[in-house]
């Protein structure tokens, strides 16, 4: 490890192999990842560090322009609402620190649950058996998921999902295509549970009062889930005819992708319960933020139901890959949702959003940055010792 730090002083721009620092952090090459994966007699083309470059994606106009547009629209809205910034700040300072800490801990409990679910999906897709490659330790899977969350918060288009496939391949040489299939299966599970929890309650309780941002997010999610279910059905029924129509050079990728997706749905009751537990953590996070600020009044069951609706709608809005972490879209939707249950309290609603996004966005950026470079430092030190 000391050699790695000393080298960083001599040449801060490159790692010991001569690659640029950012590429080295992504590449994480080792004995396992050096061996190319064979797909139907052909080497699977690896995902390159250039494709996943966070710096390049972050400075791309496709990232900057949507973010600027959404933030400007949000600022105009807040100005029209005549937000009392001082009142918002006083509300934040008066928040119950114990409830805020509980919200923080509950949110971070969801990451081990996500890793547990992903491990089952990977085992279902036979990444451990057919390819004869052991999966990384459980806490390494947690780390990979957290780094993928960091990437999703930083840049739009859910780049972090591709990161997961890339990082697992670097760990044990698993097929990135099949791994990405498990990520797609995971997303379909998430959206299905979200719809089961969210849409009926929203449609019945809010109906015409539903904010347009929420309605749009629900429509996008519903269409995505229906298309995903239809695609799964077609893939299972027409697996062989579809495979025959795909060019031979791409057929191996198709086999791995469909195997990763269709194979992931064994042990469905366990996967469903884990997904339900994950989204319960998301809902309880906002519930304790509500308690910390005394944002809403009423019976405990009512508070829990409203907090769940708002938290799940927040998650639905992040499905739209317009900005990293749904910045701007999420805040606008949350203000509109809170106003339905606590009108004429925009300043207090903004305080709730600031506290909630401190946990679900800002902490991911700060801690994710640290985790990203710790993982890079550990791998670079390992390479230095092996050299």
Image (cartoon, helix red, strand yellow):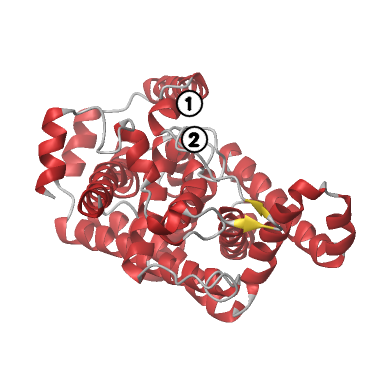
Tell me if mark 1 has few (under 14), some (14-19) or many (20+) residues whose alpha carbon lies within 10 angstroms of its own: some
Tell me if mark 2 has few (under 14), some (14-19) or many (20+) residues whose alpha carbon lies within 10 angstroms of its own: many
Q: Residue at x 26, y 31 (%)?
A: 14
Horizontal side of 261 relative to 359 (left or right) equals right
Relative to 221, residue 143 above or below? below
Please tell me which of labels 1 and 2 falls first in the chain.
1
Q: Nearer the viewer, residue 297 or 380?
A: 380
| Element class at badge 1 | helix
Q: Nearer the viewer, residue 86 or 333?
A: 333
Q: Are marks 1 and 2 in contact (CB under 8 Å)?
A: yes
Q: Quadrant of residue 272?
A: bottom right
Q: Nearer the viewer, residue 5 or 365?
A: 5
Horizontal side of 30 relative to 261 (left or right) equals left
Residue 28: give x, y in percent of width and height: 36, 48
| Element class at badge 2 | loop
Q: Residue under circle 2?
A: 156
Q: Residue at x 39, y 43 (%)?
A: 27
Relative to 77, residue 111 above or below? below
Q: Residue under circle 1?
A: 63
Residue 211: give x, y in percent of width and height: 57, 40
């Amino acid at each position: 490890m000391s050699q790695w730090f000393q080298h960083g002083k001599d040449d801060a721009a490159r790692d010991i192999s001569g690659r640029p620092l950012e590429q080295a952090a992504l590449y994480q090459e080792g004995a396992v990842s050096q061996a190319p994966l064979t797909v139907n007699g052909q080497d699977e083309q690896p995902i390159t560090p250039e494709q996943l470059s966070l710096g390049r994606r972050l400075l791309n106009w496709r990232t900057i322009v949507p973010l600027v547009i959404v933030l400007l629209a949000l600022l105009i809205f807040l100005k029209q609402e005549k937000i009392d910034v001082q009142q918002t700040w006083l509300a934040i300072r008066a928040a119950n620190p114990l409830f805020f800490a509980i919200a923080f801990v509950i949110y971070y409990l969801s990451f081990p649950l996500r890793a547990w679910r992903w491990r089952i999906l990977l085992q279902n897709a036979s990444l451990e058996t057919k390819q004869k490659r052991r999966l990384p330790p459980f806490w390494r899977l947690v780390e990979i998921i957290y780094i993928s969350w960091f990437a999703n918060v930083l840049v739009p288009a859910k780049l972090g999902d591709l990161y997961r496939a890339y990082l697992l391949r670097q760990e044990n040489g698993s097929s990135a295509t099949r791994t990405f299939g498990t990520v797609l299966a995971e997303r379909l599970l998430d959206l299905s549970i979200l719809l089961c929890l969210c849409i009926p309650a929203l449609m019945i309780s809010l109906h015409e009062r539903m904010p347009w941002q929420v309605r749009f997010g629900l429509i996008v999610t519903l269409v995505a889930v229906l298309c995903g279910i239809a695609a799964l059905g077609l893939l299972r029924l027409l697996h062989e005819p579809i495979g025959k129509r795909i060019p031979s050079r791409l057929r191996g990728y198709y086999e791995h992708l469909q195997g990763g997706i269709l194979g992931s749905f064994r042990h469905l009751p366990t996967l469903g319960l884990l997904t339900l537990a994950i989204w319960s953590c998301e809902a309880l996070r906002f519930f304790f933020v509500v308690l910390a600020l005394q944002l809403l009044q009423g019976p405990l069951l009512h508070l829990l139901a409203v907090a769940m609706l708002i938290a799940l709608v927040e998650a639905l809005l992040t499905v739209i890959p317009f900005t990293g972490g749904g910045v701007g879209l999420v805040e606008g939707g949350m203000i509109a949702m809170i106003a339905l249950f606590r009108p004429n309290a925009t300043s207090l609603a903004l305080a709730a959003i600031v506290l909630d996004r401190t946990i679900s966005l800002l902490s991911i950026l700060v801690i994710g940055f640290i985790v990203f470079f710790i993982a890079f430092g550990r791998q670079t030190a390992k390479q230095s010792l092996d050299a």
